[in-house]
Image: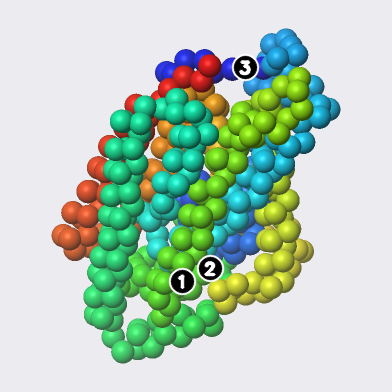
Amino acid sequence: MYVIESKGGAIVCMLLALFFLGTWPAIMTLLERRGRLPQHTYLDYSITNLLAAVIIALSFGEIGKSTPETPNFLVQLSQDNWPSVLFAMAGGIVLSLGNLSTQYAWAFVGLSVTEVITSSTTMNYFLDDKINRAEILFPGVACFLIAVCLGSAVHSSNAADNKTKLKTLSSDQKAEVKYVSFGYCQYVSFDVEDGIASTEKAKAGTADFLVQLEKRRAIKVFGKGTFIGLAITFFAGICFSLFSPAFNLATNDQWKTLKEGVPHLAVYTAFFYFSVSCFVIAIILNVTFLYRPVLNLPRTSFTAYVNDWNGRGWALLAGLLCGFGNGLQFMGGQAAGYAAADAVQALPLVSTFWGILLFGEYRRSSRRTYILLVSMLFMFIVAVAILMASSGHRK
């Protein structure tokens, strides 16, 4: 079993995890904006998300000779470690609920809004017996909180800018927007290469661009308040605050639930069980949403999902990125403390970059929006640097 022992190695894992975990939301949003139903996308994503955990377990978890103190992945599958397994699976369940929720929230609040993970960082700090440097860690948490508040301000300011842009539309165009916003625009197929469903391409950031986007996207947002998105984001934040401490308990057994002589669950074994429960919940909920959709999405079927190849490759890629991102986060957290590893939850640092590059977000926005956007990104950079600097060393 491969074990990361250096602080530098842990930080490299966290940085890679931050990139991966900030990229997969952009891919999911890209597919939703191109008209692919989120139920179809998430089912594809769930398959490769589990596959990533299996690859990590069978590679890193099988490197080297298995010993009684540090058994390899396959050896641990037959050991009496079910209390730790249940903690890992509980973490997978809440992460699955959080990820599924944010997939719908992104349509309303954008990629710049993230969830508050302060409670997760605090719990991990005490669970890890304070191996992270508190004088550095908690100022980093404060910077993260400031960045989160700025992210909400960015969204509010950008939403106001969009309302101003839409006021410039003609009366016929406004009627068309109202027609689309009530969910009467049918599902549109798209070209994965260019993602354009209409014959004429509007300039990013214009009112015409917003109208074209609303016609094309799967989740209709015009005419709906941001409260829905913020409420979903708040629920997701609760879920995200629990999965990392649960995984911490699974790998380090701080509550002494394992029998004497039973080795702690290796990070790779815990991640496998974590991903299995994440997969099961995702499949159950998304198959249900095929036939009982939410947010006025069209009803579909499992047969329609199987035959929907538009964007499937992108969805499978998103699952791999998320799976490897989570695995790297846990590998870094096991070495340097899970509180420091919570730095990877600064997803907007990466997601906002992709949003600007791929979707034309914040184009032709107000000066106030740009100032808030730059401030938010700066505070996220500071927060990530400080949180990673607080990394300790697990004995």
Residue 273 at x, y percent in the picture: 71, 38
- The kind of residue on which mark 2 rests is Ala
- The kind of residue on which mark 3 rests is Tyr
Q: In the rendered view of the protein, which quadrant contains the N terminus?
A: top right
Residue 214 at x, y percent in the picture: 43, 72
Residue 279 at x, y percent in the picture: 69, 48
- The kind of residue on which mark 1 rests is Ile
Nearer-N-terminus badge (1/3): 3
Quickly name the residue at label 1.
228
Residue most extreme to the right: 78
Distance between the alpha carbons at the discs numbered 3 and 2: 43 Å
Viewer-nearest residue: 203 or 56: 56
Distance between the alpha carbons at the discs numbered 1 and 3: 44 Å
Residue 154 at x, y percent in the picture: 28, 59
Residue at 60 percent across and 55 percent down: it is: 97
Nearer-N-terminus badge (1/2): 2
Q: Are marks 1 and 3 in contact (CB under 8 Å)?
A: no
Q: Which mark is residue 2?
A: 3
Under circle 3, the secondary element is loop
Quickly name the residue at label 2.
218
Under circle 2, the secondary element is loop
Q: Closer to the observer: label 3 or label 2?
A: 3
Nearer-N-terminus badge (3/2): 3
Q: Is 356 on the left-hand or right-hand side of 21?
A: left
Q: Is 104 on the left-hand or right-hand side of 64?
A: left
Q: Are marks 3 and 2 in contact (CB under 8 Å)?
A: no
Residue at 35 percent across and 84 percent down: it is: 173
